[in-house]
Structures are given as C-alpha cells and as structure tokens.
Image (cartoon, rainbow, N blue to C red):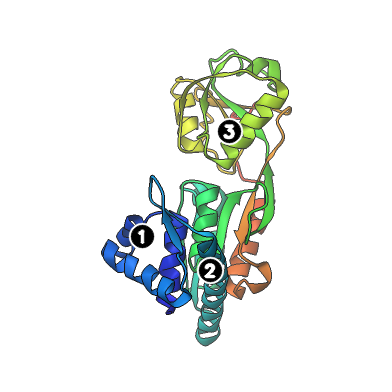
Amino acid sequence: MTLDDLRVFVAVCRAGSLSAVARDLACTQSAVSQHVKRLERETGMSLLERQPRGVAPTAAGHILCDAAADGIAGLDRALHRLGDLANGESGTVRITTGGTTVRHFMAEAVVSFRRRYPKVNLEFRTETSSRSCFDALLASNLDLAWITIGGPVRGIEQRPVVDLPWVLAVRADDRLAAHSHIDSSDLDRIRLVRLPPNSTSGTQLDAAFAELGIRSGSDTSVADWDTALLLAELGLGHAVVPAVPGLPVPSDGDGLRLVPIPALPPLSVGWAVRRWDALPPLARTFADTVADSCARPPLRAPGPDIAP
C-alpha cells in the first residue's frame, strides 16, 4: 500500500469515476484500477462497487477513504509548512475560488500582500461553486477557499468575512429605478435573471423568496453575478445580486441602478479551510489581508449608481 495508491483511491471515491481520475492524472484507466486493486488485495475487502454511472465506495471503502483523506490532508499541510520554514518569507499560498471573486474581493489585498511578501507566489484555482471549492480543498494541498457561507461541511471550517446586502439591478429607465428600496411585493411575478440553482447563493436566494412568498419568473439563469448584471444592463431582465465590492456600475446616469432589497437576509461570504490552527502562516496572513480590505468601505465613483 503506497501513498499514491491512497491518493488515487480517494480521488476515485470523490469523482465517482475511474476514467475521470485517469484524465486528471493523464494516465490510463487501467493504471487507476491497479491502484485500487492493490488496496483491495492488501485489505482483503472490496472497496468499490459499480453503479449505473461510475463507481461508489463500499462500506469498507468509505472507512478507508475517510481515514486516507484525513491522513493525506494532514501530511500535505505538514509538507507545506516545512516548505515555508525552509524558504522563510517565500513559498506559495494556494487559493480556490469562483471566477469573479478575485476582482471583487481580493484585488486590493493581492497588491498589498505582494508588496509585503514579493517572494511569495499566489496560486488561484477557479471552481464553479462553493461545493466544488470544498471538494478541491479536501482533495488537494490548497490552503484557502473563498466561498458563500452555508451549512456545516464535514472536514471544513468556515469563517464569515463580510455580509452582502441584496440589490435589484435595473436599467435607469426602468420603473423600479427611482425607488428608494425594493419591497417583496415589487419582486412578485417580475421576470428575473436567476443565479445558478446549484450555487449556494442561488439556493439561499430561492429559500428567501419562498419564505417571503415571492413568485418571480425567470427568463434565464447565469453562471455568475457579473453576467447577471450585464444582462440587466442590456435590458434583458432584472437581476437580484449581492452588493459585492467594485460592482461595474456606470455612473453617467444612463446605465444601471442598484436598488436595495432590505427584506432579503444578507449573503455571508468568507473563508473555508481544513483547520485554522494548522493553516500555514503565510496563508493566514493572506486571509487576514483580504478580510481587512473587505472591512474597509469601498471607494466608489461619484454618481447616482445606487439608489439612495
């Protein structure tokens, strides 16, 4: 039984597919299967069972996968910290996040951190949802994940950084643009550009709508907040989005209006890690730098881009 055997086995359990892991590792499916068979010979038990689509761990496989994942994560953290000790104020901080997060939440912090630690490399890995960020964090040597805060996740610690109020993005010539705020009744039955239903933010927004009895229609769903804003600016629908820092809103009077929706509970975003007390010092410093920059009021261009 080798460390590579365990790494591959954990990857197969999480992906639910031998072929997917083979593609990720740039090897054959037979090579991936050999890792699993070697573990099965040594344990004397079947660890995977075939499903209509892919494979799933057996009861024994679940036990081995959980233990191996914890051990591999701990070893990766230790190796990473040893590297930091050897390199001093150099090394790498590895972050996973959504596609538009760096621009909205981290741009200022990245500049500040790089000025302070010019020898440290920042590596960003893009994922499509908080769930995929959690999976990537558990399956690799990533340090940090920037996520929408949600329910508890096994093996993950979540730390909120900032609460984002919701706003309605509408064109300046829309009837709702002149409102000081949006009531739930204003949203009832209007057609919205929707956030992806598999995202944590989309799920939380749908739950809030249901609790308030809002029955809005939907023309389309989009992959991220920026795309929702673009469609609203083009007049292709209204968009309910969190008021993230640095929203690309024109200030010339002819673009978007962002009108607050006080009835919706704020969306909490922040960091996720495997263990805060085991986080490498450089990664902790970067996380704190981002949190500090988010705590400062954003600098906005003058103009009526958010309704008073």
On screen, residue 223 above or below 107:
above
- Lateral position of residue 121 relative to residue 305, left or right: left
**Is residue 178 visible to us here?**
no
Of callouts 1 and 2, the N-terminal one: 1
Residue 33, image x and y in percent?
33, 65
**Res. 241 mark:** 3
Answer few, some or many: residues within 10 Å of disc 3's Cα (few below 14, many 20 plus, some between 14 and 19): many
Q: Secondary structure at mark 2?
A: helix
How far apart, in angstroms, are the residues tagged by discs 3 and 2?
42 Å
Q: Secondary structure at mark 1?
A: helix
Front-lying residue, 234 or 302: 234
Residue 195, image x and y in percent?
52, 33
Q: Provide the residue designation for mark 2.
A: 64
Q: Secondary structure at mark 3?
A: strand
Q: Are marks 1 and 2 in contact (CB under 8 Å)?
A: no
- Considering the image in quadrants, where does the C terminus appear? top right
How far apart, in angstroms, are the residues tagged by discs 1 and 2?
18 Å
Front-lying residue, 9 or 134: 9
Instruction: Say what amino acid the circle numbered 3 marks.
Output: Val
Single out the mark in the foreground, 1 or 3: 1
Residue 78, image x and y in percent?
56, 79
Residue furthest front as drawn: 44
Q: Provide the residue designation for mark 1.
A: 21
Which residue is drawn at the image coordinates 56% and 43% (left, top)?
Answer: 246
